[in-house]
Amino acid sequence: MRLRVIDLETSGNHPGSSEVIEFGSVDLISSKEGWQIERLTLNFFCPMPR
């Protein structure tokens, strides 16, 4: 089984003015030995000045 864990970081908690500043994900693979980390992805974004 493959499980993808996703994490979003934002510049605040107000939907009208907050932006996504970081996106991360990791793929986990289930095997007889347990969970194995397969792939890590990180993307950073610079919020646009208002």
Image: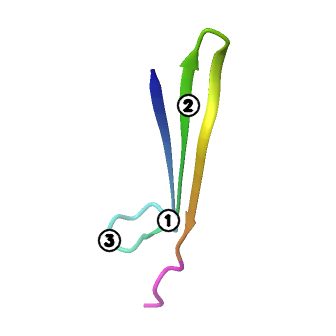
- The secondary structure that dominates the magenta segment is loop
Amino acid type of the residue that numbered disc 1 sits on in the rendered structure: Gly
Q: Which residue position is annotated with label 3? A: 16
Quadrant of the frame with the C terminus = bottom left
- Magenta stretch containing residue 21, yes or no? no
Residue 33: x %, y % from top left: 67, 12
Mark 1 to mark 3: distance in Å?
Answer: 10 Å
Callout 1 crowding tier (Cα within 10 Å): few <14, some 14–19, many ≥20:
few
Pointer 2 or 3: first along the chain:
3
Amino acid type of the residue that numbered disc 3 sits on in the rendered structure: Gly
Q: Is 33 located above or below residue 43 in the figure? A: above
Mark 2 to mark 1: distance in Å?
Answer: 29 Å
Looking at the image, do the residues carrying marks 2 and 3 touch, with CB atoms under 8 Å apart? no
Residue 15: x %, y % from top left: 34, 64
Residue at the image point whose x is 39% and y is 64% from the top? 14
Amino acid type of the residue that numbered disc 2 sits on in the rendered structure: Leu
Q: Which residue position is annotated with label 2? A: 28
Q: Which residue position is annotated with label 1? A: 12
